[in-house]
Image (cartoon, rainbow, N blue to C red):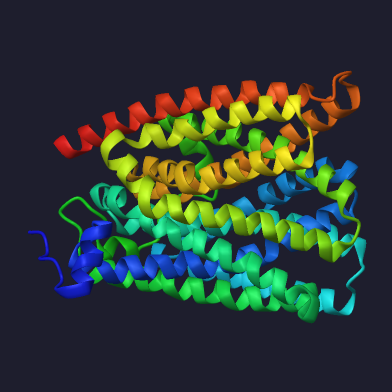
Amino acid sequence: MSSPPAPGFAGWIARLFNVKAHEAPVVGAGLAMFLLLFAGYFMLRPIRETMGVAGGVDNLQWLFTGTFVATLAVLPLFGWIASKVPRRRIVPWVFGVVVASLLGYGAAMLARPDDLWLARTFYIWVSVINLLMISLAWSVLADVMESSEAKRLFALIAAGASLGGLAGPLLTTLLVKPLGHGGLMLLSALLIGASAATATWLHRWRDRHPLPAGGSSAEQRQRPLGGNPFAGATAVFRSPYLLGIAFFVLLLATVTTFLYFEQAKLVAERFADKEEQTQVFGLIDTVVQTLAILSQLFITGRIAQKLGVGVLLVAVPLVVAAGFLWLALAPVFAVFVVVMVVRRAGEYAFVRPGREMLYTVVPADQKYKAKNFIDTVVYRGGDALSGWVKRALDVLAEHPSAAMFIGAGVALAWAATGVVLGRRQRTLEVRRDAA
């Protein structure tokens, strides 16, 4: 039975966002989990970009390769934790390691703020942990919610990520001068630790509101997933559906990397001061998250319910393809900012929620292990490969816009993959509901 709507203002809010009365606490907790996580991460992101520029724009492909190698090194450790630790304890364990590392980096940067190798290792480490943490947060939601709840609530809860993504850059812009990079990292660690506590509460909420027969039970979430540290990778290669998601993520990473290299080059050319660069990156993040919040609150959920997941996966790639063509014809900073903002806001508001909905129709071990392999190793592998391709095009191509034309072609392939995945997700959902 569905819960009756809450009276008064609370009932109006519930109807506005299509939330049942008993779901209000989990929506609030999910919003808080993402808000805290993304605020903590987006305080680090402008610092990471500044550290990348400090190492030399021409060396970014080495940082991307280092990130991929570090991701391969971390994956077995995560696989071991996921195999041995109860599902509800995976996030506290992993986030605890992240918090400890950030406290160490914060202290090191307060002592040695101009150390180039410290900057490079920080860039690589943040690039590893950001995908790991975000993937795990979404895994928790996919674990504690059934498909019908996900369609109604994922976009709304994702607004917490955008709110955090908005708060983080604002805090960075305001506090970078008085606190410095080291002080910002200490504050970020506290926010990420609080996010882990909220993720634990979500499992407890699901315990009090069990899923229907066939769903994830409290007893199951108390048990480890089992298997070996590499089970996520083998599961991906055995499943055409998961391989399709991996290819979608690979194309997404390629598009992102091409634009990222352009961002680093154009910012380095226009802004010489490190703190100015950090403020520029923070301002771009602020605009992106504002647009994403508005879309998530008023557009994304309605599209998912009425038109399906496929539309969320296809719309942004098509717009990005047009943006690449525009940037190829007018490679200036103002045009780039427009394209970058549209791409990132669209990814947060449409592509990411749609991508996470793809996992609501797979078993629990794939929601954690296979999903994490795709979100980290496949994504960072795409980063590393496309980083070298972009660098080679910049050096060898006679036309400076060649990379942008190639990027447009990649974006169109990305859109086509989204069409296939959207149809397959709908088929698997119908089969599961009929079983």
Q: Quadrant of residue 383?
A: top right
Instruction: Tell me what residue is drawn at x 37 percent, y 30 percent.
Output: 422
Relative placement, left or right, of 152 versus 142 is left
The answer to whether residue 27 is above or below residue 107 is above
Q: Position of residue 239 (x, y in %)?
A: 42, 30
Instruction: Tell me what residue is drawn at x 83 percent, y 62 percent.
Output: 276
Relative placement, left or right, of 282 versus 274 is left
Relative placement, left or right, of 321 versus 62 is left
Q: Position of residue 195 (x, y in %)?
A: 49, 71
Q: Quadrant of residue 392?
A: top right
Q: Quadrant of residue 58?
A: top right
Q: Is residue 339 visible?
A: yes
Give the quadrant of the C terminus.
top left
Q: Position of residue 336 (x, y in %)?
A: 72, 39
Instruction: Tell me what residue is drawn at x 43 percent, y 49 percent.
Output: 295
The answer to whether residue 308 is above or below residue 93 is above
Q: Position of residue 335 (x, y in %)?
A: 71, 38
Relative placement, left or right, of 249 versus 127 is left
Q: Residue furthest left?
A: 1
Number of callouts: 0
The answer to whether residue 127 is above or below residue 428 is below
Give the quadrant of the N terminus.
bottom left
Instruction: Tell me what residue is drawn at x 51 percent, y 49 percent.
Output: 348
The one nearer the camera, 64 or 295, is 295
The one nearer the camera, 401 or 375, is 401
Q: Is residue 38 visible?
A: no
